[in-house]
Amino acid sequence: YNGHLHNTAYLALALDAAPADVTAEGVHTFRISYRSPLRLGDAPTLQSCPQSGGWAASFVRAGEVCAVVAVNEQLTPLSGTGR
């Protein structure tokens, strides 16, 4: 769409590349951080590693991190009421 990868496609691509043990019990949480859109014709690499009890994948184009997808992280709960 508009010459760049749709936002939801990052999650689908990351899950396709995830190790079986990450997806075996299902996806409970995910977080996607966008920095720069991937465009038609880009040739990104996917770099991944275990992260905070889950798994993270970075989409990298020419040394630039374009997006990071984190799956099943164990995040610290927010403190306070947030009001």
Image (cartoon, rainbow, N blue to C red):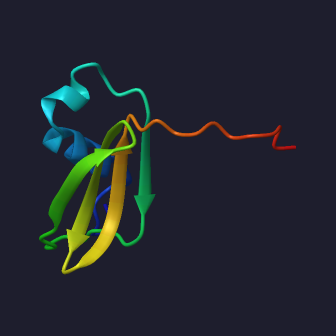
> Can residue 2 be seen here?
no
Judge whether 69 appears above or below 28 on screen: below
- Asked whether 67 or 38 is in front, the reply is 67
Name the residue located 12 percent from the left edge and 71 percent from the top edge. Answer: 43
Q: Position of residue 17 (x, y in %)?
A: 14, 44
Name the residue located 16 percent from the left edge and 68 percent from the top edge. Answer: 44
Number of numbered discs visible in the structure rendering: 0
Task: State the residue lying farthest toward the bottom.
Answer: 62
Name the residue located 40 percent from the left edge and 42 percent from the top edge. Answer: 52
Name the residue located 44 percent from the left edge and 33 percent from the top edge. Answer: 29
Q: Position of residue 56 (x, y in %)?
A: 30, 49
Judge whether 59 appears above or below 7 on screen: below
Q: Quadrant of the N terminus?
A: bottom left
- Asked whether 70 or 49 is in front, the reply is 49
Q: Is residue 78 toward the left or the right of residue 49 in the image?
A: right
Task: State the residue lying farthest toward the top.
Answer: 25
State which quadrant residue 15 falls in. top left
Task: State the residue lying farthest toward the right.
Answer: 83
Q: Position of residue 72 (x, y in %)?
A: 38, 34
State which quadrant residue 62 falls in. bottom left
Q: Quadrant of the C terminus?
A: top right
Q: Position of residue 23 (x, y in %)?
A: 23, 28
> Can residue 55 be seen here?
yes
Q: Is residue 72 toward the left or the right of residue 17 in the image?
A: right
